[in-house]
Image (spheres, rainbow, N blue to C red):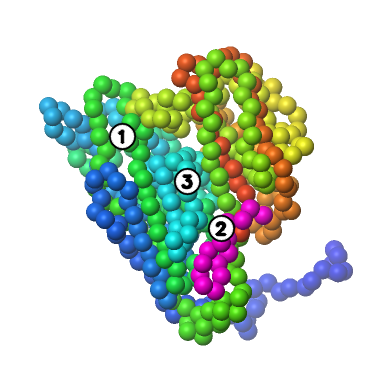
Amino acid sequence: MEKFDVTNDEILPTTIDFFNTKPNLVAFQNSGLVEYPPIYPIGNGGPIRFRINSGQTYLDLSKTYLHTKFKVTKKEDGKFVPITNKDTVSFIQGFGATFIRNLKVSFNNRHVYHSNDLYAYDAYFRRRLGLGVSRKEGTLQSAGFFEDDLSQTSGTGFEARRSLFENDQIFETICSIDADIFRQPKLLVSQTIVDIEIDLHKQPFVLLTTGTEEYHYHLLDCNLYTKQHLLFPHIDYAIQQKIENDNLVKYDYTQTVLKSFYINPGRYEFRTPLFNGYVPKRVFAALVDAKAFHGHVGMSPFEFAPHGIETIHIRAVESFVPAFKYELGGKNLTRAFKDLNDATDEIHGISYLKFKKHSCIFAFDIQSQHSEDFIETRQKGSTVITLQFKEAIPQNGLQLIIFAEFNSIMTMDRGIINTLPIQI
């Protein structure tokens, strides 16, 4: 027998490695999930605020969850009464996260994340496309995400979400916090105070109904859970000594930026700069009726239809994405669908028919490779998007939703004072 390549390393299979065992993990003295209630009682419609004082522990931000209890009622003779299986009402998709309008995060009184009133779209894009969030069915359903068929205002997903609240039932959701800095694996160093502020969407945005009854959702309770680790003293001491010696703590992560642009009725073309600093590594774009975007109980805010689009492209510095112009004709979306598959490694669960009907999300992959092991050299310059339509924009106008990703670094110094995230 001979080797295919004489320079290859040689290894033995673990099945005959009789004299070794798995290595020991020697970092954590103890670990556990800790519950944090809101600072102030909920129920007055104001912001929900949480504060985590880590003390000597290190926080696993990727294991931070929001646990929320919901109820749906209808108004009848001036009173709120339970809904039944005859009521055509349901929550929007992924409501355990998408009921949030805005989310802000601070470390030691320095802002590190602000969703700019677009948190619902941040959370929806992540769960719909699997961007840093598990697409396993159990995880999605725990967050109130039940897969829709070809309609978002009726059908299997709509009925599944409605049935959770029949006959005065309460449903509890558990979902991750989708702030970008929470989607990286490193622990947050000790002696850090984390402040989280949540603003809620109003009733017309969160509920869907095709009927004429007046329905309300009620947020009954909301708590935060995060995993905390207490390190062995000698390991903690070594880390603190490095910080005291002016070594920066570094967190490299994918920073997300969401933007929305209004496209006026009657237009056939729309062009706008997206970014004038560094070029993003990946951009997702979708169109939604402006009335649904601002909240209307009869319309889903996530109904991303093609809206008669003829072509769409991004110019990043001097490059065009896609390199060859789409010729969509308002309905020939195969190339755009394939580009979405390629950009997301086809984990989104969107069929071609759903893509044409209500999940038409355009993907522009500007990076050369997908890898969590390295970051690519940054490009500096303008990023511009252009859309052309076969027919004039309808009366309500359209809202263009942009979800962009950048490679970024956040650093913390020996005074545990944050620097702002740096796009790299």
**Residue 293, percent across and down?**
44, 30
Badge nearest the viewer, 2 or 3: 2
| Magenta-highlighted residues | 410-424
Dominant secondary structure (helix, strand or loop) of the stretch shown in magenta: loop
Q: Residues within 10 Å of mark 1 (few under 14, many from 20)?
A: some
Q: State the mark number for residue 420.
A: 2
Residue located 57% across and 76% down the image: 243
The answer to which of 171 and 230 lies nearer the viewer is 230
**Residue 261, percent across and down?**
54, 31
**Residue 92, percent across and down?**
38, 35
The residue tagged 3 is 115
The residue tagged 1 is 203
Badge nearest the viewer, 1 or 2: 2
Q: Residues within 10 Å of mark 3 (few under 14, many from 20)?
A: many
**Residue 419, percent across and down?**
56, 61
Residue located 34% across and 54% down the image: 49
> Which of disc 2 and disc 1 is earlier in sequence?
1
